[in-house]
Structures are given as structure tokens and as C-alpha cells.
Image: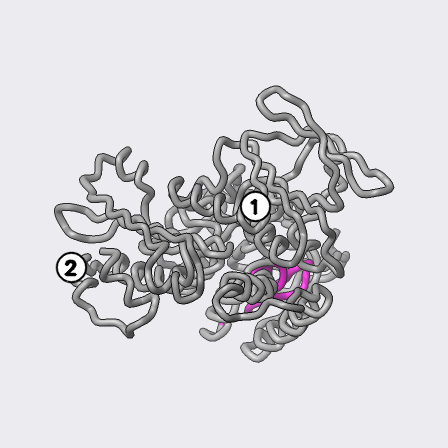
Amino acid sequence: MTRKHEEPEKYDLMVIGAGMAGIAAATKCASQGWRVAIVDSLPYGGTCALRGCDPKKILRRGAEILEAAHLMGDKGIGEGGLSVNWAQLMKHKHGFTDGVPASMEDGLKTHGVQTLHGTAVFTGPTEVEVSGVGYHATKILIATGATPVSLDFPGHEHLIDSTAFLNLESLPPRVLFVGGGFVSFEFAHIAARAGSRPIIIDRGSRPLKGFDPDLVDLLVRRGAECGVDVQSGTSMTGVEETPAGYQVHLQQQGVASMIEVDLVVHGAGRVPDLSRLDLEAGGVAYGPGGIDVSADLQSVTNSAVYAAGDAADTEGMPLTPVAVLEAKVAASNILKSGNAVPDYAGTPTAVFTIPELVRVGVLEDEAQARGMDIEVRYTDTSRWFSQYRVGETAGAVKILVDRSSDRIVGAHLFGHGVAELVNTISLAMKYGLTARELRSSPAVYPSVGSDLGSML
């Protein structure tokens, strides 16, 4: 409870969640002279900078180098003695992540934002309590992100989450990943190149459901070549700890089995992190997808509250750039009492496996379900120069073009360097460039970017 006889400190805006979205909104409003506070129970910086995108990409660099040497092993590049020193690679990661919280907090303070630490709990429509201290805010933005979904099979407590994996002091030889999404695939591809034998267990018929199935099949086959074992249609029924590690009990098509591993990692999805906020006390409606908001990101039940990122139930993908976009739109609406809405057009997403798999726009089956008249331009790029140069033998692209407008409505790419190439396609989609206009645009040659004209 709020301390008696103390007036709650008052702010124009209270931001709950100090990830990239919350920080962007807090900074924007403070720069306009608003009195702003931000609070988080975890170190400032959020999942992306501390427990997700950035540290994962640093660890991937070690895997990239090993794989690059392996691909060129019979082409004049010696692999002898090359290996991943996990402890040193992790130290390299910490060299980036350890300084983030203080840097983020210092930046906020420079803009005049009051930084608070603790768990925020609603005590009224515009009242929040943090560590027993009450605060009043004219407006409140919730940007608390997501947390791993709860699992209910026996022994679920033995699993570690993605945060713990990114802080492992050593990498064991046998690692099992639960779930067929981003986390499992990206971590498994790192682990395989670092000397582990990873297994991905996915209860669905195919993994990575948000990506083109034909390209996912290519990725699964390519991963198998480097030791990533994907078992689809498989459910986990229990985990038992043993002196040697863990016994994992599985079921596939009604047949029970058991495997022994050293580590089990939760990669089975995430849900909005809202459970500690007591949203009922704030009159804030929410559901499984997050806080119920209108198109302008305002709570449908409490006009003082806005939400952005994974905490909000919107059509935006669960990506940091989308969360930041939503937070900036919400901040603009808060400042101006406006009703602007986020523009999600041309938002790309990637699975940073080796090689990577990317998507922007609609999938082929989505286009068909919407009755769109599209031309599907599929190209096997496995023998193209960009792949040959680095020794890679897997690659393909599928680009969906609207026949009437000649505009790209979906692009799906698998191969070396395509995570950079997709940004050009994203820009073209967002601003209405046609496939013909893209083909006529010169590019640096030879580069992955120069492949785009031939893909179209």
C-alpha cells in the first residue's frame, strides 16, 4: 500500500517498461517538456538489447566464422584448430550487454526522465505503486514486453529460458529446444556450430509457421547437414532430472519415446508480460494477445492508458522495430491528444539461422486466401555467384507480385546475406515502387544486393 500521509508524486506520463519501446516514448515526451517517469523491475534496455536480438547476434558471429571456414574447407581455407571458445565468446557478448543498462538510464536522465526501479502495480485508473511508493500520472504507457509462456508438463521447472541460454558459462554437448520458432532455430544453429548436438522438438506439423513453407523445408534440410535435428509432430510429456542430465519423455504419432540430454531450453513461445500489473485495479481490459487497444493504441476501457509492443493486442508483429514504432505513435497521440495509427507496411522479419531466412509481406497461401491475383516468382539461388563465392549450396527466393499493379506484396528469401537484401524490398513495398522500377535500379556488383534484379 502507498505510505500514509504522503501525497503521490505526480507526472504527466508514467512509462511502465524500460525496453526500447518504453525508452523511445519516454524520451519523446520528455523532450516536449513533459514530466516523465519510467519504471522497470529489470535492468534498463529490454529484451532486445540485453536478452534477445543483440546478444544472440553476437554469439551467432562465432558460429558464422566456423561455418564459413567449413564451407571453404576444400577450397583452400584450412580449418585446423578452429573452434568456438564458448567462455570467451560469452565474455565478448557481456562486453556489449553489461554496459547497456547504465547507458540507457543515463540517456533518460539527460532528457530529464525520472528513472525508477521495481514492479509497477496499478492502484487506480491513473495511480501506480512502485515498491510501496505511490505515483499519479495523467497518462500511462504500458510497454512491458513478453515473457515465456507457461508450460504444464511434469518437470517443466527443469527447463531454462532464452535469457539463461544467453548467459550459459559453458555449452553442454546435448541440448534440446522445445518449440519450433525463432528462439529454438537460432539458438540451435549457434549450438551446432559451437560443437553441441541440438534437437528441436515441435508439436506442430511444420516449424516456423510464419515463414514460407517451401523455404522452411530448405532450411530444415540445410540445418540437418550441420547437425540440427528437427522432430516435428512431437510433444513433450515430461522431464526428469538424472545424475547425468535429463530424461525427456516424448510422444510422436501416439508412440512414446525417451531421450537423454544435458540441457532443455524453452523456445515454445512468449505471451504479454502483464500478470504483475493488476490491470483490473486500473480498469484496463486485456486478453491473451495483450491489452485491448484501439487502432491509436489507447486502452479501450481506460482513456488515460496506452500500450505498445508485445504488451498491446495489435496487428503488428512481435519485433523490436514494431514495438518502437508503436511507442512513438502512442507518444505522439499522448502529446497531441491525436489518433494517429501505426503503419506496419513493409515490415520485414528474419530468422538468423545460418543461412538466414527472411520474410516481408504476405505468404503465398495468405494471398490466395484473400483472392489476390499474384504472380509467384520462385528462383533457386543455390548456384548463384553470391552463394558460390562463400561455398554455400542452399538458397532460394519466392517473390509475390500483384499482376495489376506490378508491386511486390510478399518476398521470402533463404540464403547467405538475404537479411540485408530484404531491407531494399521492404522500402520498395512501403513506398510503392514496382518490380519493374526495382529491376531498373543499378546496384553495386557483385553483391547480394545486385541479385535483386534477377530475382524479379
Please tell me whether residue 158 is drawn above or below residue 347 in the rendered image.
Answer: above
The image position of residue 87, as x and y in percent, is: 73, 66
State the residue in front, 376 or 374.
376
The structure residue drawn at horizontal position 21% and vertical position 39%, both measured from the top left corner, is 372
State the colouring used for the structure image.
Answer: one colour
SS label for mark 1:
strand
State the residue in front, 67 or 301.
67
**Pointer 2 local density, CA inside 10 Å: few below 14, some 14–19, many at least 20:** few
Residue bearing the label numbered 2: 436
State the residue in front, 282 or 288.
288
Separation of residues labelled 2 and 1 (CA atoms): 41 Å
Membership of 43 in magenta stretch: yes
Q: In the image, is 437 to the left or to the right of 275?
A: left
Membership of 255 in magenta stretch: no
Q: Amino acid at mark 1?
A: Pro
The answer to whether one can see residue 341 in this image is no
Q: Amino acid at mark 2?
A: Arg
The image position of residue 353, as x and y in percent, is: 51, 54
**Which image quadrant: the C terminus?**
bottom left
The answer to whether one can see residue 239 in this image is yes
Q: In the image, is 161 to the left or to the right of 394?
A: right
Start-end of magenta stretch = 34-51
Residue bearing the label numbered 1: 272
State the residue in front, 405 or 89.
89
